Image: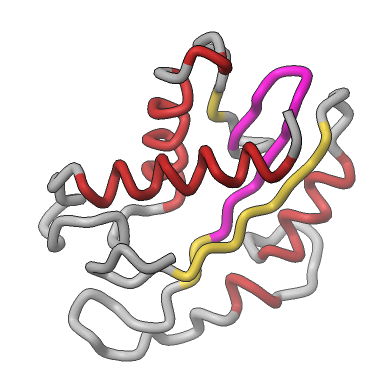
Amino acid sequence: MNLEELVSDVTEALVWVDASGESFRTFRAGVGPYGEPQLVKLIANYLNKLPKYHKSVRTKRNPDLLVPNEWAAEFKITRPFGDNGKEAENWSVNLLHPYPGNVSSIGDCQKLGNYKGPERRAIFVNRLRACSTSY
């Protein structure tokens, strides 16, 4: 499976979650308000319904999503604005904080670099809006 196919399948999963009409906690319906672990779990559930994944996709702490013998993937959600339309404080820290052991996309790259499995590695950085199908 190439990266383009994985990206397409993850995109389809995000559209599926967004169209489901289910809301996360007390927020508006849509993909935007989900936390990273909850959203990755929903992505895995969707992928596992596709025959080519053979119900083998797992969520883990490191990496976030594992397609055994294919891909180890980390996910990073960026939200410049909250559900209320107000600017989120410190949202850029999730992208750029350069120190090992943190939760930034740079930290995720370091985690993938240290991952010992045979899978190829990918990081997904998504800018989600609170209630939008734009990714």
Nearest the camera: 66 or 70? 70
Q: Quadrant of residue 13?
A: top left
The mark total stands at: 0
Give the vertical position of 16 relative to 117 (above or below): below
Quadrant location, the N terminus? top right
> What's the magenta bit mostly, secondary-structure-wise?
strand
In the rendered image of this protein, does residue 29 appear above or below residue 17?
Answer: below
Q: Which residues are magenta?
A: 65-76
Residue 44 placement, left or right of 122: left
Query: Could you tell whether 68 is left or right of 41 in the image?
Result: right
Q: Is residue 67 magenta?
A: yes
x%, y% of residue 82? 29, 78
* Of the pair 65 and 93, the residue shown nearer to us: 65
Left or right of residue 83, residue 12 in this image: right
Rendered residue at 58%/51% (across/down): 75
Image quarter of the C terminus: bottom left
Residue 35: image x %, image y %?
38, 53
